[in-house]
Image: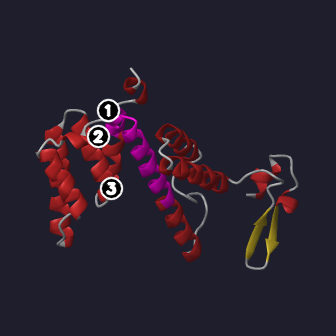
Amino acid sequence: MRNLIAATGRDPKRVLTTVPGGYLLDTAGGSVDVVEFERLAAAGHRALESDEPALASSLFADALDLWRGPALVDVAVGALLGVEARRLDEVRLGVQERRIEADLRLGRHHMLISELSALVARNSRHEGLHAQYMIALYRSGRQGEALAAYQRLRAGQVRDLGLEPSPALRSLQRSILMSDPALGAPVPAYSQAV
């Protein structure tokens, strides 16, 4: 680590100092990726809550662009850092889920299918991602695939956990079965003004 700091031209002993219980990093007024990520994510959450999905999607995407892989992947982690790494990975997934929510509100369902397909494969018990995947498929004219995604999740949960999907997910499945108009793609703002 000190070699990497030296490559920046700063004195490694001034940038990374040993203190009781660990190390102290002096960023000299710069930002740390995780702090910038959390700032952008918080702004994205506020934008989504204020019904500004385009701004929210952009802020969430900027936050996610700061990531290059799993949290703390190149750091030797003990018990405490392991917990923090898992927390950061969960926060990242939550931000990704909220960005997808914003994109669904914007009618970008076609663009989300491949991303959601990979996410549900990696997160086979995550009902929120499955719901988003089902909605994206349904809005893309792929009702059968949306129902098949539900059945795969349900079969895995019943087999492995003895649990049925949540009431919200079962309700979504029924809405897809009935071709509920409420599930239709939102009309982009520019089309509403015409």
Q: Residue at x 13, y 40 (%)?
A: 144
Amino acid type at image mark 3: Gly
Magenta-highlighted residues:
91-114
Residue 162 visible to the viewer: yes
Q: Which mark is residue 128?
A: 3
Amino acid type at image mark 1: His
Q: Is residue 79 left or right of residue 140?
A: right
Measured as percent of width and height from the top left, residue 193 is found at 41, 24
Q: Residues within 10 Å of mark 3 (few under 14, many from 20)?
A: some
Position above or below: 170 against 102: below
Please state which of residues 6 and 17 is positioned toward the viewer in this rendering: 17
Q: Residue at x 52, y 71 (%)?
A: 83
Label 3, secondary structure: give it. Answer: helix
Label 2, secondary structure: give it. Answer: helix
The image's colouring method is secondary structure
Q: Residue at x 29, y 58 (%)?
A: 127
Q: Residue at x 83, y 59 (%)?
A: 15
Q: Main secondary structure of the magenta part?
A: helix
Do callouts 2 and 1 mark residues in contact (Cβ within 8 Å)? Answer: yes
Report the residue that reaches farthest toward the top: 194
Closer to the N terminus: mark 3 or mark 1? 1
C-alpha distance separating marks 3 and 1: 18 Å
Which quadrant holds the N terminus? Answer: bottom right
Q: Which mark is residue 110?
A: 1
Do callouts 3 and 1 mark residues in contact (Cβ within 8 Å)? Answer: no
C-alpha distance separating marks 2 and 3: 12 Å
Amino acid type at image mark 2: Ala
Report the residue that reaches farthest toward the bottom: 20
